[in-house]
Image: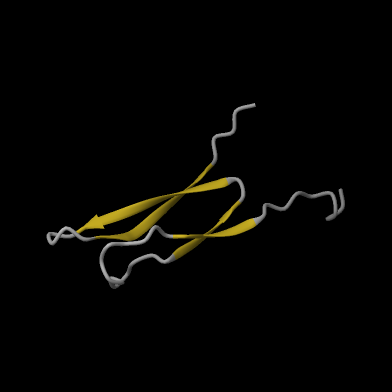
Amino acid sequence: MNKKDEKTPQKQVILAPQSHASIASGSVLSVEIDSDEDVEWQWMHFPNGQSAVMGYKIAKKNICK
């Protein structure tokens, strides 16, 4: 098999959902994933009612054939 025949997953940059808090230290702005992956955002909720994306989890998409 040559390199031309190999399928290379396409990368994409996913922007984090807009946070209600100003940019918090350590907040996530974006993540790069393969076309066969999904991202799950992890939120931190502050006592003042604001929220910010502080992490993420990448998982393979569930593809039913």
Q: In what quadrant of the picture does the C terminus appear?
A: top right
Quick one: which residue is furthest to the left in this view? 47
Q: How is the image coloured?
A: secondary structure
At which x and y percent is residue 12?
59, 58
Q: Residue at x 32, y 62 (%)?
A: 19
Q: Specify whether 43 is left or right of 60.
A: left
Q: Specify whether 18 is left or right of 62.
A: left
Q: Quadrant of residue 26?
A: bottom left
Residue 35 sits above or below residue 16 on the image: above
Judge by depth and name the residue closer to the eye, 55 or 16. 16
How many numbered markers are drawn? 0
Q: Quadrant of residue 63?
A: top right
Judge by depth and name the residue closer to the eye, 57 or 3. 57
At which x and y percent is residue 42?
33, 53
At which x and y percent is residue 36?
60, 45
Q: Residue at x 85, y 54 (%)?
A: 4
Q: Residue at x 42, y 66 (%)?
A: 29
Residue 62 sits above or below residue 7 on the image: above
Quick one: which residue is furthest to the top in this view? 65
Q: Specify whether 2 is left or right of 43.
A: right
Residue 64 sits above or below residue 58 on the image: above
Q: Specify whether 22 is left or right of 48.
A: right
Q: Residue at x 46, y 64 (%)?
A: 30
Judge by depth and name the residue closer to the eye, 2 or 40. 40
